[in-house]
Amino acid sequence: MVICKPALFGHRCWSVKKHRTYSYRCLNNRFNDLLVVEKNGGSRTALINSPSSLNAINNSMVVKLQKMYREWEDDPDVGFVILKGRGRAFSAGGDLRSIFNMMKQGKLEECKQFFRNAYGLIHMIATYSKPHVAILNGITMGGGAGISVLGTFRVATQQTVFATPETLIGFHPDGAASFYLSRLPYHLGEYLGLIGDTLNGAEMLSCGLATHYTHSTNLPLVDKVVANLVTASADPSPIATCLQKFQDSVLHHHTSLFHRLQIIDTCFRHNTIEEIVQSLEDEAARENDAWCRSTIKKLKGIAPLSLKVALASIRLGRSQTLEQCLVREYTMTVQALSKQISTDFYEGIRAKLVDKDYSPKWDPPRLEQVSQDMVDRYFSPLSPFEPQLELPKHENTVS
């Protein structure tokens, strides 16, 4: 299963040129050299270089990446782009500590600007007219998944850890998550989006989130061979052929979610969180299933409003284009930032990442206290005076 195949335009030939490496310095000196760029023949490699923060992306990084991607798309000497991260993460997502501090200081417009830029970058990568290769060697979560899984190629390894854990901090699966999760088989997307559970690299390949799987020890050679690939156009097939040479077979451990797909499909196909919980309880009682009991326990620890909003979002995503999903997710994000419906997003970051007391006080605290009106308000159109998410019209619409 392949989630999306952005249309690709033809481009001029290129030849191998002398290798050189240079850095794009971010606007804040504290983040010097967060983006390291390598030029190899007709390719460009962007390395997210912030291992201490698990390569979390901030607004400066997003703006720089957008600038580079535009330049490379217009450059006939650039045939394809490679994106990877240094250290044990590809990218753990958005810089939530910075978002928390901005929310605390009342700088909501800066928060909104970050999300507009981040969603714009995700859209740019998904509709890029040149092949895009993401090397997912390590933690790939949230926004880190957004800037990778919609590109042409996604190479996972045994060290890959994928998740969309937004509900765990009182938020909703964003960064196009409602688009790509809704297209996974067996209602696996609902499970991942609600629970925030992880997939490994082999599981990503099996469900289509990754296009290739190789052992991490192969990556230095993959980097060398792919980056220096010479091709006559932006046709992705030579890259696909090259990556296939490093493809390793996958075998799912007995604890893998892929041995639970049938029960996930049975329980997470329902239209309400209450029905999902009831279905899990029925399965737990029928089969004395510890996995079902554990899943119920996890659901009961997550923000009730986030669960209902996330389920509604993923279900809407199934019938929407990528552009529609991103615009809607931005509307939902603005609602979460405003704290007018609930303070769950702020409280979730505080409890899980700042104070680390791991005891968030969800508002409301129980499922039965979440009204349909509260859920509907998350999807309400923004005021015409509110800056909107504007995505460029593009021939490569992703549906």
Image: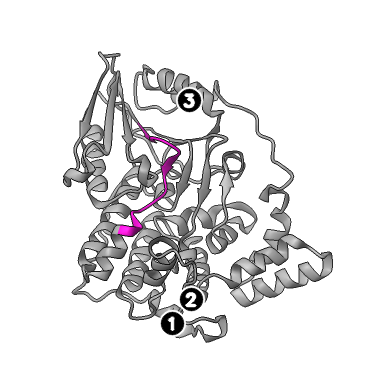
Determine whether, in the image, residue 112 is placed left or right of residue 346.
Answer: left
Q: From mark 1 to mark 2, how far is it between C-alphas?
A: 8 Å
Q: Which of 377 and 257 is in front in this view?
A: 257
Q: Where is residue 282 in the image (x, y as percent from the top left)?
A: 77, 72
Amino acid residing under circle 3:
Leu
**Label 1 close to label 2 by CB (< 8 Å):** yes
Q: Where is residue 359 in the image (x, y as percent from the top left)?
A: 49, 71
Q: Mark 1 vs mark 2: which is more N-terminal? A: 2
Q: Could you say which disc has been placed on residue 144 in the image?
A: none
Disc 2 is placed on an element classified as helix
Q: Does the magenta stretch include residue 267?
A: no
Q: In the rendered view, would you say 355 is above or below 202? A: below
Amino acid residing under circle 1:
Met
Determine whether, in the image, residue 96 is placed left or right of residue 250.
Answer: left
Answer with the quarter of the image where residue 208 lies: top right
Q: Nearer the viewer, residue 161 or 116?
A: 161
Residue wearing tag 3? 219
Residue wearing tag 2? 305
Q: Which residue is drawn at 64% across and 69% down?
A: 297
Applied colour scheme: one colour
Q: Which residue is drawn at 36% across and 77% down?
A: 380
Answer with the quarter of the image where residue 66 lies: top left
Q: How crowded is mark 2: few (under 14 residues within 10 Å), some or many (20 or more)?
A: many
Residue wearing tag 1? 374
Amino acid residing under circle 2:
Leu
For the magenta stretch, what is the residue range? 82-97
